[in-house]
Image (spheres, rainbow, N blue to C red):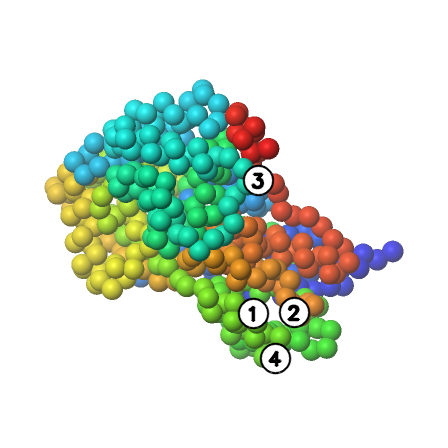
């Protein structure tokens, strides 16, 4: 008997992480998948390209994952690229002047596994640590709170957090993780970040950094889909998605193609414009009108000498928030090169977006020298500034009520993207989850239901009792 999936075709609009996850899952399910990507490379907002001003291949922004990102890790396993991720077990927090503290796991059971290094951290006072511990005690118990109108900054103040604890801990973690200021972050998703990465287990907080450019990492998905009878079309911009009786018509500059199903995996800013022009689209367009964007700025610096032996560090009390010394972990780095390639990251970078390249480079070098004085002596060989104005959506308080499910009013059109109701915020993990959820919804409608989503990382230690 012929497998019915072999005759079904799927168009995936968007070659970002959500689209690639959906495409790979559906290809595994036996459907014939065609991914349409308008750029000449895949990865979406997690991509890389040759920068015209430097001749170097750069990521549009440094992306990291944590051990709690179970679906992202599974996606890497699916593609066979887990060996391209370098894992780190500690975070270095630095103050101007060079004083630093390390947060890392110990032999203690969760949620106390980081307690020894946390208690030793000089970037926080005893009063700060006691305040943080009280907040953690609230976060560690019971189910996640509903997505209420309260923002996380208000929650912190209501729970007695010191200003230094907010600046040196809560803000540092959340602005980087969720790319938004504390007063614009949902309490529910702030809880989720700390519970999943800091409290549930030691493994959950491990940080992974790709050792290859992002588009090299995700280009493996192209061959994965093609090996299963599908295709990935680059420089293929979709201008419209419409229903044609029981089929879906995809319009590109090359003409129109019909498919049995479509997964719309475009950013929320573009999704509304691609929806079918009929009355069914209006409620979804109204939901999307509640979304807002937040920017990230990446500052790439090539120096003629090593600036620090550290591969990465959190930088406190300044505009720049993270330092990644990419020459320490990129496979393409020349081991005999005495110089160093660094990327500085500023999340929620609304103020920097308005500044010129020269202003940003001057600020970055001045601030970097406060942490690593050798910068004053080093020669800057070349530099690049990359502003991702629409890097992520803002996980605003109360936004969950507007995040759409994978299923739509059209029986054969589905949605994917970190902005959909994935249960996670604007992260790579959220994007992968959304792609898998779209694939699950589609295969169910197609009469061949399959599960692709994998479970969260389980709690260990005492957290198993607190989160029963």
Q: CA distance from mark 4 to mark 2?
A: 11 Å
Could you tell me which quadrant the N terminus lies in?
bottom right
Q: CA distance from mark 3 to mark 4?
A: 38 Å
* Location of residue 17 in the rendering, given as x and y in whole percent from the top left corner: 52, 54
The residue at the point 59 percent across, 74 percent down is 281
Could you tell me which quadrant the C terminus lies in?
top right
Question: Is 66 rendered above or below residue 432?
Answer: above
Question: What residue does disc 2 label?
Answer: 409
Task: Mark yes or no: residue 233 visible.
Answer: no
* Location of residue 291 in the rendering, given as x and y in whole percent from the top left corner: 45, 64
Question: What residue does disc 3 label?
Answer: 456
Q: Residue furthest left?
A: 377
Q: Give whichever of 188, 204 is nearer the camera.
A: 188
Secondary structure category for the residue under label 4: loop
The residue at the point 57 percent across, 72 percent down is 283
* Location of residue 60 in the rendering, given as x and y in whole percent from the top left corner: 37, 55
Q: Are discs 3 and 4 less than 8 Å apart at CB?
A: no
Give whichever of discs 1 and 4 has the lower sequence position: 4
The residue at the point 45 percent across, 20 percent down is 107
Residue 284's label in the rendered image is 1
Question: Is 127 rendered above or below residue 353?
Answer: above
Give whichever of discs 1 and 3 has the lower sequence position: 1
Q: CA distance from mark 2 to mark 1?
A: 9 Å
Question: What residue does disc 4 label?
Answer: 278
Q: Are discs 2 and 1 less than 8 Å apart at CB?
A: yes
């Amino acid at each position: 008997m012929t497998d019915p999936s072999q005759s079904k075709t799927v168009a995936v609009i968007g070659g970002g992480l959500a689209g690639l996850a959906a495409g790979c899952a559906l290809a595994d399910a036996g459907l014939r998948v065609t991914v349409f990507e308008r750029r000449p490379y895949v990865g979406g907002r997690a991509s890389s390209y040759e920068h015209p001003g430097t001749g170097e291949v750069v990521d549009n922004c440094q992306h990291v994952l944590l051990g709690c990102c179970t679906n992202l890790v599974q996606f890497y396993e699916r593609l066979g690229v887990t060996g391209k991720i370098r894992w780190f077990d500690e975070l270095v927090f630095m103050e101007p002047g060079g004083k630093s503290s390390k947060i890392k796991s110990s032999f203690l059971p969760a949620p106390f596994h980081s307690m020894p290094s946390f208690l030793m951290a000089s970037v926080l006072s005893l009063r700060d640590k006691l305040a943080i511990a009280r907040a953690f005690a609230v976060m560690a118990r019971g189910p996640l709170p509903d997505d209420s109108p309260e923002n996380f900054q208000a929650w912190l103040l209501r729970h007695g957090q010191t200003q230094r604890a907010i600046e040196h801990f809560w803000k540092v973690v959340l602005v980087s993780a969720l790319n938004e200021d504390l007063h614009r972050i949902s309490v529910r998703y702030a809880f989720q970040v700390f519970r999943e990465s800091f409290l549930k287990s030691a493994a959950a907080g491990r940080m992974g950094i790709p050792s290859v450019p992002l588009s090299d990492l995700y280009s493996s998905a192209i061959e994965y889909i093609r090996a299963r009878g599908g295709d990935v079309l680059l420089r293929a911009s979709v201008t419209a998605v419409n229903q044609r009786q029981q089929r879906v018509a995809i319009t590109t500059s090359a003409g129109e193609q019909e498919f049995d199903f479509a997964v719309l995996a475009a950013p929320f800013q573009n999704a509304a414009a691609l929806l079918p022009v009929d009355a069914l689209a209006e409620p979804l367009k109204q939901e999307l009108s509640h979304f807002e964007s937040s920017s990230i700025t990446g500052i790439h610096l090539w120096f003629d000498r090593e600036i620090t032996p550290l591969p990465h560090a959190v930088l406190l009390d300044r505009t720049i928030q993270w330092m990644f010394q990419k020459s320490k972990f990129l496979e393409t780095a020349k081991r005999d090169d005495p110089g160093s390639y660094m990327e500085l990251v500023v999340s929620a970078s609304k103020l920097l977006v308005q500044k010129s390249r020269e202003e940003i480079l001057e600020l970055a070098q001045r601030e970097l020298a406060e942490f690593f004085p050798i910068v004053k002596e080093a020669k800057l060989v070349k530099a690049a500034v990359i502003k991702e104005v629409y890097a992520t959506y803002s996980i605003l308080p109360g936004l969950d009520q507007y995040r759409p499910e994978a299923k739509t009013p059209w029986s054969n059109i589905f949605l994917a993207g970190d902005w959909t109701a994935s249960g996670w915020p604007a992260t790579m993990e959220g994007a992968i989850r959304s792609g898998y959820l779209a694939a699950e919804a589609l295969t169910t409608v197609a009469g061949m239901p399959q599960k692709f989503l994998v479970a969260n990382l389980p709690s260990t230690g005492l957290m198993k009792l607190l989160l029963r």
